[in-house]
Amino acid sequence: MSAPDESLPATAADLRMATFRLARRLRCVRVADAMSDAQLGVLMTLRLHGRRTITALAERERVTAPSMTSLINGLEEQGLVTRTVDDHDRRRVQVDVTDAGIDIVERTMAQRDDLLIGAMRELDLTADEVRTLHDAAALMWKLAER
């Protein structure tokens, strides 16, 4: 059963504002202060999904290939990613995250999770509210990945 169309605008506005505020709060928490959100996003993508071409990374992160090349150059200079020639097509380059990059991702994700856990504990959420957030997270993933 679909949601009534008249409730979608208000729900969309509330979701946008809440997501924006929460994302801003989470972005403030990172292990490497000098790292941009875009660079951290690339490292997280590589950590979660494995090696990718620059084109595939650009599509996934919704940026242009030249922008992604610039991001990868900066991450490579810091020793956080490596480039290797594709085994099947020598014209293509694969990008992979290094152990140092994985460390940054894992520590940043842990700190951000701790922030959320602390906030949920501070609010003393009920079991039903935690389940609602869990269900909402699954729906937000659907929206984000479309």
Image: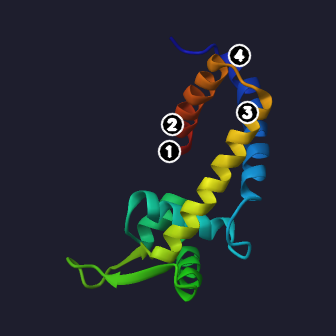
Residue shown at 54%/15% (left/top)?
A: 2
Task: Return the residue nearer the eye: 79 or 15.
Answer: 79
Mark 4 lies on residue: 6
Q: Amino acid at mark 3?
A: Arg
Residues packed near mark 3 inside 10 Å, few (<14), some (14 to 19) or many (20 plus): few
Going from N to C along the chain, the mark reached first, 3 or 1, is 3
Q: Amino acid at mark 1?
A: Glu
Kindly report the distance in space between the C-alpha atoms of the residues bearing marks 2 and 1: 5 Å
Residue 92 location, x and y as percent?
Answer: 32, 80
Kindly report the distance in space between the C-alpha atoms of the residues bearing marks 1 and 4: 24 Å
Do the numbered discs 3 and 2 sit on residues whose CB atoms are within 8 Å? no
Residue shown at 50%/11% (left/top)?
A: 1
Q: Nearer the observer, disc 3 or disc 4?
A: 3
User: SS for tag 3?
Assistant: helix
Mark 2 lies on residue: 142
User: SS for tag 2?
Assistant: helix
Kindly report the distance in space between the C-alpha atoms of the residues bearing marks 3 and 2: 26 Å
Q: Which mark is residue 145?
A: 1
Q: Nearer the observer, disc 1 or disc 4?
A: 1
Do the numbered discs 2 and 1 sit on residues whose CB atoms are within 8 Å? yes
